[in-house]
Image: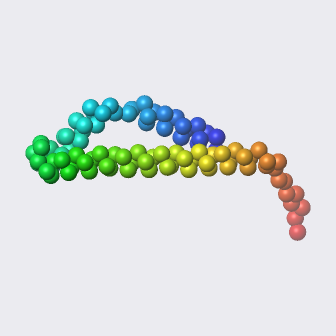
């Protein structure tokens, strides 16, 4: 279990290290909306850019919730493993 938690922490750290700047996100959103054939400044273009921002925010919030759940699960796992003393069953046959 500890290797899994360490691996998850490493992946999370690498993901955060690759964060985009605001300018990079705006350029990506611009490329997406223009890729749909929308003209800059048109109402549809503005709506597309708002959708891109809202989608990014929703994905970030979902990421934060998953991280919180993993943190709680890890805390429970660590707490229960400290109280575990082991169990051995002696099998003598029938």
Percent from the top left, x then y, of residue 78? 70, 44
Q: How many marks?
A: 0
Q: Quadrant of the C terminus?
A: bottom right
Q: Quadrant of the N terminus?
A: top right
Considering only vertical position in the picture, is 51 above or below 30? below
- Front in this rendered view, residue 19 or 41: 41
Q: Residue at x 28, y 37 (%)?
A: 25
Residue 3 appears in which quarter of the rendering? top right
Considering only vertical position in the picture, is 23 above or below 51? above
- Could you tell whether 21 is left or right of 7 in the image? left
Q: Residue at x 89, y 61 (%)?
A: 92
Q: Residue at x 50, y 49 (%)?
A: 66
- Front in this rendered view, residue 10 or 21: 21
Most distant residue in the bottom direction: 94
Q: Residue at x 29, y 45 (%)?
A: 53
Percent from the top left, x then y, of residue 5? 59, 41
- Could you tell whether 73 is left or right of 84 in the image? left
Percent from the top left, x then y, of residue 32? 20, 44
Percent from the top left, x then y, of residue 79? 72, 46
Colouring rule applied to residues: rainbow
- Front in this rendered view, residue 65 or 91: 65
- Could you tell whether 2 is left or right of 63 in the image? right
């Amino acid at each position: 279990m500890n290797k899994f938690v360490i691996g998850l922490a490493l992946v999370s750290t690498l993901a955060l290290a690759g964060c985009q700047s605001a300018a990079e996100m705006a350029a990506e959103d611009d490329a997406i909306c223009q890729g749909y054939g929308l003209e800059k400044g048109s109402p549809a273009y503005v709506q597309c850019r708002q959708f891109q921002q809202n989608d990014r925010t929703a994905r970030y919030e979902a990421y934060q919730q998953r991280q919180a759940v993993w943190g709680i699960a890890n805390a429970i796992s660590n707490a229960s493993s400290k109280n575990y003393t082991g169990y051995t069953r002696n099998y003598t046959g029938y």
